[in-house]
Image (spheres, grey):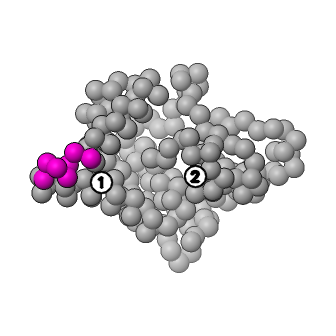
Amino acid sequence: MLPLRLVRLSKNAAFAAASGQCMFFDAKIYKKNQWHESVKNQVVEDIEIMKLIKQEKLNAEALLSNGLIYCRMYNNMGESINGFSKNLLAGFGNNIFILLFYQLLVIIGPLILFLNFNITLLVLPFTLIILSRIMISYLSGQSVLINLILHPFQMFFFLIISFISIQKHNFKTGTWKGRSIKTI
């Protein structure tokens, strides 16, 4: 959902992405900052570390593994939905309005255009969807056809995971499933 190039090009903490399973640091800088210690109470530690790095105006980048690294986080759909629902809202800074606005742009907008079936209005969003799926497929070494076919299902599950993430977020205590989080 986040263009990875912006992670490197922008010093803005809004463009923070990381994969906690494989992160590399300059040892001296890491020991000085102790990032994992700073974010140990956060739901999405890797993203929070990347935000801290960006706040320090240090260089950072999120890269594709191109098959060199493998990690299986979940064993079934239930675990996946539960795990991603924990991470999704936190990835949007625990800001429900930003998450809903993003959904409006990437799901609801194209869906409304599709339901109204105005072909001239459909060309731009569907061309962007198709081109982005092609680019993602090639960059990640995946099948273009399968990613195009799965796109509607991915968007459907994105809505489900978003709903669960919002539902589980507790505004009064700032917790998610018993873990303390920073609310906005």
Q: Along the horizontal axis of the image, is 42 left or right of 107?
A: right
Residue 76 lies in quadrant? top left
Instruction: Give the magenta range.
Output: 118-124
Q: Which residue is mark 1?
A: 107
Q: Is residue 165 magenta?
A: no
Q: Is residue 123 magenta?
A: yes
Going from N to C along the chain, the mark reached first, 2 or 1, is 2
Dot 2 falls on a residue whose secondary structure is: helix
Q: Along the horizontal axis of the image, is 152 left or right of 34?
A: left
Question: Going by the picture, which residue comes out furthest to the front?
Answer: 120
Residue at 25% x, 33% y is 149
Q: Considering only vertical position in the picture, is 88 above or below 25?
A: below
Distance between the alpha carbons at the discs numbered 2 and 1: 21 Å
Query: Residue 77 at what x, y percent from top left?
Result: 37, 41
Residue at 61% x, 39% y is 62
Residue 131 lies in quadrant? top left
- Amino acid carrying mark 1 in the image: Ile
Quarter of the figure with the C terminus: bottom right
Residue at 76% x, 55% y is 56
Label annotation for residue 15? 2
Dot 1 falls on a residue whose secondary structure is: helix
Question: Going by the picture, which residue comes out furthest to the bottom?
Answer: 172
- Amino acid carrying mark 2 in the image: Phe
Q: Along the horizontal axis of the image, is 2 left or right of 8?
A: left
Residue neighbourhood size for the residue with mark 1, other residues' Cα within 10 Å, grouped as few (<14), some (14–19), many (≥20): some
Most foreground residue, 146 or 60:
60
Query: Residue 113 at what x, y percent from top left?
Result: 19, 55
Query: Mainly helix, strand or loop, the magenta region?
Result: helix
Residue 165 seen from this side: yes
Most foreground residue, 183 or 145:
145
Residue 45 seen from this side: no
Q: Considering only vertical position in the picture, is 157 above or below 132?
A: below
